[in-house]
Image: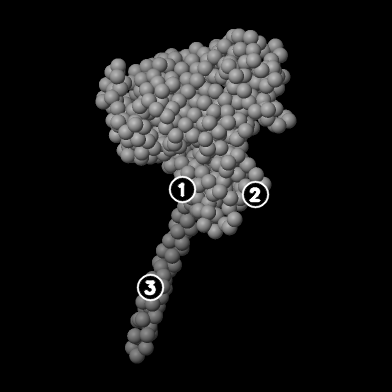
Amino acid sequence: MTRVKDFFAGMLDSGKNVNFSKGKKKLFLAVVASVLLVAAVIGVVAGVKSRSNNSDHHADIQAITSAAHAIVKSACENTLHPELCYSTIASVSDFSKKVTSQKDVIELSLNITCKAVEHNFFTVQKLIKTRKGLTPREKVALHDCLETIDETLDELHTAIDDLELYPNKKSLREHADDLKTLISSAITNQETCLDGFSHGDADKKVRKALLKGQKHVEKMCSNALAMICNMTDTDIANEMKLKGTTTNRKLREDNSEWPEWLSAGDRRLLQSSTVRPDVVVAADGSGNFRTVSEAVARAPEKSSKRYVIRIKAGVYRENVDVPKKKTNIMFMGDGRSNTIITGSRNVKDGSTTFNSATVAAVGEKFLARDITFQNTAGAAKHQAVALRVGSDLSAFYRCDVLAYQDSLYVHSNRQYFVQCLIAGTVDFIFGNAAAVLQDCDIHARRPGSGQKNMVTAQGRTDPNQNTGIVIQKCRIGATSDLRPVQKSFPTYLGRPWKEYSRTVIMQSSITDVINSAGWHEWNGNFALNTLFYGEYQNTGAGAGTSGRVKWKGFKVITSATEAQAYTPGRFIAGGSWLSSTGFPFSLGL
């Protein structure tokens, strides 16, 4: 329209000095009027069309935004912290363009969580550099936080990668197990960081500086885990309906075929009667290395094939760390009474529980056989870990784990112990892994004066975590130093370290060392309604359940179907990986 005006303005300007006759003038004015009328009509039509297009576009945006809001609201309503879940997603610019499914909501949530984790990492680094007057243990605890926060980032990034391929890369059940394990472990890591500051009043001041950030990440991870559980459980249920049978799951659990990821070389290694080591550790200098730590340091990083370290008979006085980059490591000893790795770090002398471990295995698919892991600090030194395990798909065969308080720290991820001996006093099997102990000897020993023995202290903090301690087909008893005086030192199957503590004892023999109440409280009524403690088909003088605690969370399991959920095949997805260890195992009841 502007161009039309300009055109005629130009004509009129240029015609200032032109003489029109009366008739020509009328003709000219008629032409001008016609052109203006046509232009006006075109302008009106164009305006109407423009407004119509804008209106349609606005309606489309509103529909997309409304649909995205509905998806986010639906995804968040099953979480433990729905307001945080919804507000976090809604605060993302153009989130409505990024959300078309529940999976999109989970991915977006995990990406936001990663940024929060990175912020926490820098907060800890700043505290280490700038905070004055830190005690030695506080410094250790802050470095523990850096380690666990770093692991959390790895777990979240792996989960995001796994989600992008969902549901096509693996079976739905494998996707579900892996995703639940990753986020369960991420939640545990936040708790572990804070637990390092629980030993004294000074520690608690540093804890306060970290509390808000760590708890925020924990809640974010909790929401992601709830959404993952909802999505995968629904998809698995729908798949089962379509197939109309549960036989496929049964076949998968009882399958002892080699896992797809196991290389041909590793299969030959595991099928052979003798395992050939890559390197040998010998204290007397007859091997490649004199210390286990040196052999681990020289091992390849992120190895996809098994790397075997033979540890010859001897006593190795060292603290050994197998970090997350050292994957597929195997420790092979010369027998549990011959190859001994021993240390004495403890909380009383300034360590954290996490850092007190004589051996810490974090790199995934760690294996150990025919070795003793020991912490000799003694009952008076409080928490002193012999073996800490955060390695996913890790297994231990014919190993001894010997200490007093907190002997075996099943920290996180999926773990399996077979034909092992675990001995200790207070909370001597503890942590928040998904751990199954099968055909093991579990012995309480004589504790310090006035102490009670607790076989387990499971640390599940979220009802959606796939974690817990399962003791199956084991023998629970007392060491020779406790037996004569066991009436003076009451011993219990466990107590709830955290709010959703979960422990199941099944098909095991239990001697009279166990108090008839079976279980003990942690502090008053804490967790008694939210924990889950189950017993199934146990035998022996200490197995009777008539005198057991009457807590809401305690249950005598009578259904084989319910008990089946806690077998290696189901609880740690054993059908997909235990055969790769070369160790004996049973997947079912």
Give above or below for 189 relative to 120. Answer: above
Q: What's under tag 2, amino acid-wise?
A: Ala
Where is residue 176 drawn, in percent x and y? Answer: 46, 29
- Verify CB contact (< 8 Å) between mark 1 and mark 2: no
How far is mark 2 from mark 3, CA to CA?
79 Å
Residue position marked by numbered label 3 in the rendering = 3
Query: Tag 2's secondary structure?
Result: helix
Asked which quadrant contains residue 432, the reply is top right
Q: Which mark is residue 202?
A: 2
Determine crowd level at label 2: few under 14, some 14-19, many 20+ residues with C-alpha closer than 10 A.
some
Determine crowd level at label 3: few under 14, some 14-19, many 20+ residues with C-alpha closer than 10 A.
few
Q: Tell which of 398 and 226 is nearer to you.
A: 398
Give above or below for 298 relative to 169. Answer: below
Where is residue 233 drawn, in percent x and y? Answer: 51, 27
Determine crowd level at label 1: few under 14, some 14-19, many 20+ residues with C-alpha closer than 10 A.
few
Look at 41% across and 75% down and name the residue there. Answer: 5
Outermost residue toward the right in this view: 524
Asked which quadrant contains residue 256, the reply is top left
Counting residues from the N terminus, which is met first, the one under dot 2 or under dot 3? 3
Where is residue 563 drawn, in percent x and y? Answer: 55, 15
